Amino acid sequence: MKIRNRTVVTMAALASSVALATMVAAPANAADTLPITFQADTTTIIAKTGQPVVFPTTDLVTDVDLVGGTVTGTLALPQASADLKLGPATLANFTISIVDPTPVSGTLTQGGPAEAPTLDLAVQQSFKIRIDSVKPLGIDTGSAGSASVDLIPAGSNCVTAETTAELTGSLDAIDLIQNNQADAHVKGTYTIPQFQNCGAFTSVLNGIIAGPGNSLDVHLTNPVFDVGTQSALAAEVA
């Protein structure tokens, strides 16, 4: 899918600080890649339990191809912990890691009406999910308490096969251009494959966690643009 000329102009305006409405078409030899780093706050909801897992804040580092209309980038989610629930009952606290993530890749196209243009993202990323620990609650183990009990055997690799999340969302183009700001949610769903090598409780974990329809929401804010690339683009469109 090719990005429309107006979107090229829109992104070039970021570098030259000229409003979209006053820009002329970018020359054919204009720099065609703009690095943008977003703050990324990511939440997934396990479909079977309705349980949210909130990952610590990290960065989505992207390269936007202004001519080809593609986006590539990296999103490495930090380890996260959450309660494992079944209905109203909290069974345990568990810690998970997203491992072997592929680069983020997808397309960028212009959407929205002329008076409120958007930059529409459609991206995907593949990864595996590893459970690092499952510590049951309410078990009397003496002074150490339940925190000393871990259902995941030491040294095991309790991990899924690779899965892929398909995400879509829209950035406010004018807010991005004029204010260098963003407040967008890129959302989608993915399947949690069956876990392997989790010890005696492998089937229990799969029964509670594994399955389709899990939501993933990446909240993008605080964009930072590569100053050198902005300057190069500005020189080309000046």
Image: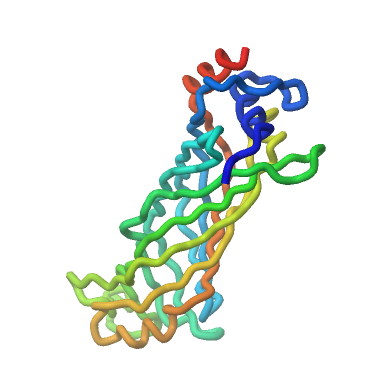
Residue in the image at 65% along x and 28% along y: 9
Q: Within the image, what quadrant is residue 159 found in?
A: bottom left
Q: Within the image, what quadrant is residue 208 found in?
A: bottom left
> Along the horizontal axis of the image, is 156 left or right of 61?
left
Is residue 149 something one can see in this rendering? no
Residue in the image at 54% along x and 47% along y: 107
Q: Within the image, what quadrant is residue 158 found in?
A: bottom left
Is residue 220 something one can see in this rendering? yes
Whether 77 is drawn above or below 71: the answer is: below
Whether 66 is drawn above or below 127: the answer is: above
Report x, y in % for residue 153. 21, 77
Relative depth, front residue between 90 and 233: 233
> Along the horizontal axis of the image, is 137 left or right of 157?
right
> Along the horizontal axis of the image, is 231 left or right of 24?
left
Relative depth, front residue between 204 and 23: 23
Report x, y in % for residue 139. 35, 85
Residue in the image at 58% along x and 41% along y: 2
Tell me the quadrant of the picture where the C terminus can be found: top right
Report x, y in % for residue 232. 51, 17
Residue in the image at 32% along x and 70% along y: 161
Q: How is the image coloured?
A: rainbow
Image mark count: 0
Whether 83 is drawn above or below 70: the answer is: below
Report x, y in % for residue 156. 20, 72
User: Quick one: which residue is furthest to the left in this view?
Assistant: 155
> Along the horizontal axis of the image, is 25 left or right of 122?
right
User: Quick one: which residue is furthest to the right in this view?
Assistant: 115
Relative depth, front residue between 10 and 174: 10
